[in-house]
Amino acid sequence: MINKLKIATATVLLGVTAAFPALADDSKIVVGFATAESGFMEAYDKPATDAALIRIDEINAAGGLLGKKIEVVKADTKSDRAEGAKAGLSVLDQGADLVVVSCDYDFGSPAALAAEAAGKVSFFLCAESVKAGIQGVGPHSFSASVLAAVQGATMAEWAYNKKQAKTFYRLLDSWTEYNKGICDGFDWMMPKLETKGAKLVGQDTFKNDDPSIAAQISRIKALPKEPDAIMLCTMMPGGVSAIKQIRAAGINSMILNGSGMDGSYWLSAVPDLSNFYVPVQGSIYGDDPNPEVTKFNAAYKAKTGGDPSSMYVYPGYVMIDVWAKAVERAKSIDADAVVAELEKMKNEPTLFGPRTFTSELHHQNQTKYLVADTEKGKPAIIDSWTISEPIPLDALLK
Amino acid sequence: MLQILFDALSLGSLYALGALGIALIFGVMRLVNFAHGDVIAFCVFALLWPSTDAMAIVFAGQLPWYLLVPFVLFCGAGLSVLCEIVVFRRFRNANPATMMIASFALGFVIRYFLLMLFSSRPKSINLLPELSQPVEIFGARLPLLQLITIIATMLILIGLTVFLRRTRFGLEMRAAAENFSMARMLGVRANRVIMGAFALSGALAGAIALIFVAQTGTADIQMGAAIMLMAFIATVIGGLGSLAGAVLAGFLLGAASVVMQVMLPIDARPFRDAFVYGAVILVLLFRPQGLISARGTKERV
């Protein structure tokens, strides 16, 4: 009996404490990070989280949002999907008005679904699958990055127009949805280029953890002529291995990849790599055409003690930026009002390229990319490109 | 055609070395050592200075090759022997399933130790860059490394055969593999033989690590898992406990993998491994005891 009483009291107390933050909401706006602070995903979540915190600091320093300070609460997903759902609930319990979730769709969706169920806005830090948004979570979910398909399409169209690439070879690493997404975009763009004289001369697949892709390379070498460009749809760590083996076999075609291979930290594995191109949202190399980006890089270094290691830092900043603008315009933190304002954004300028959200797609299916070219082991921005038309939804959901 | 042969041999070499490392320990202890893959990963990370930065700080990896190779082999052997002394020795009389679970646990410990020191981010290093250039043999163009892998594997296999057949230690090891308690009664010192097997197996892990890093330029804490799986399958179809069988099956698996990649139509290629495993099931249906069954295991089953 006494035990039952104790439990009842405890339950009531718990209920009160859980309800309390909701009451205290008026004086501040809460952004909850249900991201990985430990384990496998931490290396990917932390840089973008730091960038988001920089934007929050800037907003707070400028007087806050709707006159209120933004407060940050965090819960660690421990790089685990079940823990992700708990982390989502935890930041919601702490009164989060915006729930920020892991970079990857699979790891971020449990927390995003928790936010959706509570009727709150959620943002994937940098997921590039079309599922990270309305299609995979619900109408209050967004992603701060750009669809993987746009990266593949951008590189193909750019190489054809700017590098006179006529013959393409498609090499897909079938490991992740992200990799397939890049090649989906390439597949959507290729027929358009073929009507103008380009040609797909061959294709093959490999697996990210294949210790050797010798058989795939032999197939490329068996072509009558080396292709102008190899569309390599892959990511770390197998991507490095693939590039190293392609070059070690003496194939010098230009290699096109997605943003996943941006960064100079892996270039030591392939010394003097040349003719290698990736699309990026901003330059970590200090040569961005927009001087504000270089300023941001300095702010990032001041906050974290290191330079950004890849462009996947930037979406975190973009995320808070567009969300805060929508809150200002809605003059409210009500989720539906904020979503309505976000969906009105059409080519909204941000530090890292324009952003558009519609009631059908909370992701970017066409945006400006910078092109980073690596020559003799040194990456630099050489161009920028926007695909000629947005990628339609049915090509994305293929 | 020749190109395919070389591709198959070089991939098969990796699997054969891995399978040999597992078969050696299984032979003397009836232990399927699932920590073997993580020993490989450990050997790779031994080349780096611990840091969680994205950029790898190459430390031991800068040694000249004649110091580098012994260093990595020694790292593998050392860790492997340490595992034996700290963990497996206490399970000497446990049943094989218990030992297998212990090896899983040990693998996790090694992996998370590396995660703690190096973070989950894959690191890049350029090991022995002079090997990354193409050479031409009989009209087939292949990276020098591929050739060296094949030659080194052959040398290791020949060396190991001589060691097992011609030395006293090798004799003891073979005796232990065949009938452990009988060998003990005849004066073979168990701890010495088992430790020797672990040291050899660890050194083989080191050899795989070297080839792997030189080939891929990547250090990843999960990198051992894929090779471990293939190597384990090779030891099973080779006949558990049979060293020759493990090597043969390793080469066969490599060949099957390469041939499938070449022959399959593009739409089926992402499922290459499914076809390879299908072939494995077929082999086991017809020869459940493995291609070359070890004498020691036959009577026990």
Image (spheres, coloured by chain):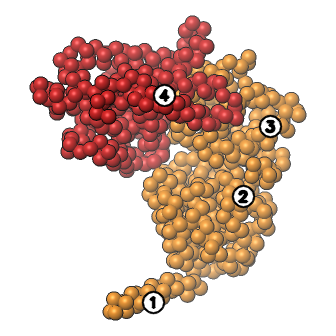
Chain colours: A orange, B red
Q: At label 4, which amino acid type do we have?
A: Phe
How far apart in space, not on screen, are marks 2 and 3 (Cα)? 22 Å
**Can marks 3 and 4 be said to lie on one chain?**
no
How far apart in space, not on screen, are marks 3 and 1 (Cα)? 62 Å
**Can marks 3 and 1 be said to lie on one chain?**
yes
Estimate the x, y position of residue B194 in percent, counting from the top left. 22, 32
Q: At label 3, which amino acid type do we have?
A: Met
- The answer to which of A141 and A52 lies nearer the viewer is A141
Specify which label sits upstream in the sequence, 3 or 1: 1
Mark 1–mark 4 CB contact (< 8 Å): no
Residue B68 in sight from this viewpoint: no
**Can marks 1 and 4 be said to lie on one chain?**
no
How far apart in space, not on screen, are marks 3 and 4 (Cα)? 47 Å
Label 4 secondary element: helix
How far apart in space, not on screen, are marks 4 and 2 (Cα)? 53 Å
| Dot 2: chain letter | A
**Can marks 1 and 2 be said to lie on one chain?**
yes
Identify the residue position indicated by label 4 in the image: B286
| Dot 1: chain letter | A
Label 3 secondary element: helix
Specify which label sits upstream in the sequence, 2 or 3: 3
Mark 3–mark 1 CB contact (< 8 Å): no
Instruction: Look at discs 1 and 4 and give the one toward the viewer.
Output: 4
Instruction: Look at discs 4 and 2 and give the one toward the viewer.
Output: 4
Q: At label 1, which amino acid type do we have?
A: Val
Left or right, B257 with respect to B238, comes to right
Residue A180 in sight from this viewpoint: yes
